Amino acid sequence: MSEKQATGSSVTGSQALMMALERQGVEVIFGLPGGAILPAYDPLIDSSIRHILVRHEQGAGHMAEGYAQVTGRPGVAMVTSGPGATNIVTPICNAFIDSIPLVVITGQVPYGAIGTDAFQECDTTGITMPITKHNFLVAEAQDLPQVIHDAFHIASTGRPGPVLVDIPKCVLDPKNPRSQLEYYEPGTSALRGYNPEKNIDGALIDAAIDLIEEAQRPVLYCGGGILKSRAAETLKDFAELTQIPVVTTLMNRGGFPDSHPLCLGMPGMHGNYTATTSMQKSDLLIALGARFDDRVTGNVEGFAPEAKIIHVDIDPAELGKVKPADVRIEAGCKEAIELLIAKVAERNAGAKIADQVKPWRATLDDWKKKYPLKYSQDSDSSVIKPQFVLEKLAEACPDDTIITTGVGQHQMWASQLWKFDHPYTFVNSGGLGTMGFAVPAAIGAKVGKPNKMVWAIDGDGCFQMTAQELVTAATERIPVKIAILNNAYLGMVRQWQEMFYEERYSEVYLSPDLPDYKAWAEAMGCEGIRVDGPEEVESTIAKANEIDDRPVVIDFRVDAQEKLYPMVPPGASNDDIVLGGDE
Amino acid sequence: MMTSSSGAMNKPAPTHTLVVMVDNIPGVLSRVAGLFSRRGFNIASLAVAPTDDPTLSRITVVVVADSAPIDQIKHQLFKLINVVEIRELTDEDSVERELILVAVSLNDKKANDKEAIQKLAEKYDAKIISESSQALVLAMDGSQKEVDALEGALKQYGIIEIQRTGKISISGA
């Protein structure tokens, strides 16, 4: 369309919307039409943009998130007013807390009807104000090209996040004179209250290196900001130059290769002993794009008591929000790390720092050997351990396989046991903890990276929340693979009730057989397989990996008693890590 | 959350005064007020009006100091796309005013009440802008402290109704 419609031509709002989206390079929209957004769906037919018709608007949002997380480009979702908009509120909130660039377009009742409780009216900008980086209510068709440009600019720069554009029907509807406009090329965003460019004070880089040169037990505490700023390679350079060990938070799994000798893995409530304890005993935390989340710090007063802190974040509101920092650097991780590398080189300090951390590294290597993650799949047992499934899956899949998860035990096991050696291969719901994320996120990820294998590791509770999107996947021929670790429980809640509520199980039992996951998968156009015993695990995974023309769902019947360890009990200090088993 | 700053009786909590310049567009006050409530920042008073630049509104917001570090409040505020500029004003480098309208009862009082109130008004530089046999309405502008003092002094006569604007503030000359 953009080739046919030149600047200055008279178009309708809905045409202008499509032109503006095409201009942004949008290749796919996840959405579901309805009354108020209907006019936008007409020029979509003639557009170059692929539309994926979801079965529930929440699916559209999570797909857009999965797409954004693996491609680094904003995910786009389009839904109607009222319930369409409210159904996508959860993904918007998820994207907000995990800093995922999204542009969500919602239909709205005609401008004159706003405030009258019209059919399918809801105050969408009001509802999403606290959970968007910004939102717009488009008053005039003439504003559309600039608003769409600004929406993408805001969503994808600085600390990324979701931006919502609410468009009244009259602005889109060709039958309404209000929708007429002269199309124009939007100018660069003239948002005087928004400037994502950062100037880094060189003195802060010097101050940071001063601390690093003094430190005996430094740790690079690396969060999602590493991936957001495309800094994985730069981080590797810095870690190798200084030989400082790296912990990767849940939002940064894959941001530093797990197989690298400097990698300690995930810290926190369900982190491994070495990663969690390295931070506790550290004398210098170099926090890069991490926000001292409570699931990482445990009890904040007891967190890393001896550590000085260098905190790098593109969002100045994060600096010192939870823990005061000795050096605060307001910058994107990539830029900041590049400056740190240059400064180390300039001072010729690399070898000295590396030498100084040798004893610390030896200690950490000892811990790694002494306190590995462990579980046992007894050879004579007929019960499948969930960890065993993950191990066999990891063995059978290419090492750049994209993993998505829901939220709960299965999510933590996936994060702990999978070896993530590539950035943008782990997609999960970190901050909000959104159950049901895995299936739609996997679909979005596969759309973004069609040549990569995509496995959703899911729980049975999570699967039941958004499984209907497998109809979308089957219809659109998006061959994602789903491994349900079916323990017939809301497993994480069950574990808390076992540990902290004296085994008084309240409303956590789900049944392994209801629904029949195999039959359900088949009804949705997928290959459905059920695995009852450990001996079938490998062969079934091999079979699933052969299927590339439709989605596959495997119902792994796993041990309902298995608990997730290590665990720092809620509210406890990270010193009180519980290793589980025989300790 | 949005409480008035009637500090006449209680000792007022320490506050910060922020001047927040925002795009003059619909919904912007809601964005600013919503941010304060969801982050748990307590507002002591808030005044908002357009400026000489019709595209900008100026908000003077007085924040309860112990509800959050002032840097955190400023950084979170500045993340709002429609917030263009934030300045923190201190007593030393700024001048402030607040306006109070107060109706005081003349019913069931001693005959010399009216005279006493008139004297009070004179003392505090307040104007009587409306009067009847039942009530006097006083208007006064001054610093928050001065307004607090007038309010306190009038209490004994029976306040029927009171409206304060909240503080507005501007850099000193």
Image (tube, rainbow, N blue to C red):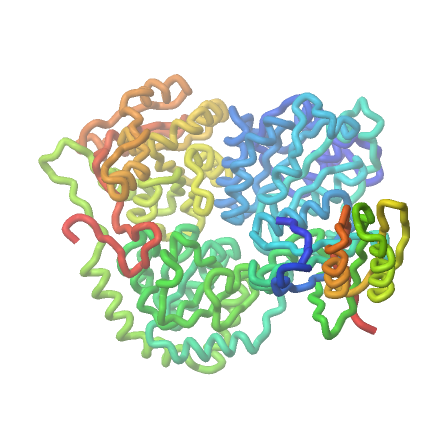
Q: Which residue is drawn at 31% across and 56% down?
A: A259
Q: Is residue B107 left or right of residue A354?
A: right
Q: Which residue is drawn at 38% across and 36% down?
A: A456
Where residue B103 sits: x, y (%)? Answer: 81, 49
Q: In this view, does A543 lie to the left or right of A61?
A: left
Where residue A524 sits: x, y (%)? Answer: 41, 20
Closer-to-camera residue (A169/A347): A169
Tell me if residue B14 can be seen: yes
Closer-to-camera residue (A320/A241): A320
- Picture quadrant where residue A401 is located: top left
Which quadrant is the C terminus of chain B positioned in?
bottom right
Rendered view: A482 above or below A24: above
Q: Which residue lies furthest to the front in this view?
A: B111
Q: Residue at x 65, y 59 (%)?
A: B9
Tell me if residue A544 can be seen: no
Where residue A431 sits: x, y (%)? Answer: 46, 47
Q: Is residue A290 left or right of residue A569?
A: right
Where residue A442 sits: x, y (%)? Answer: 44, 36
Rendered view: B131 above or below A118: below
Rendered view: B145 above or below A485: below
- Picture quadrant where residue A198 is located: bottom right
Q: Which residue is drawn at 50% across and 35% down?
A: A63
Rendered view: A434 above or below A418: above
Closer-to-camera residue (A80/B16): B16
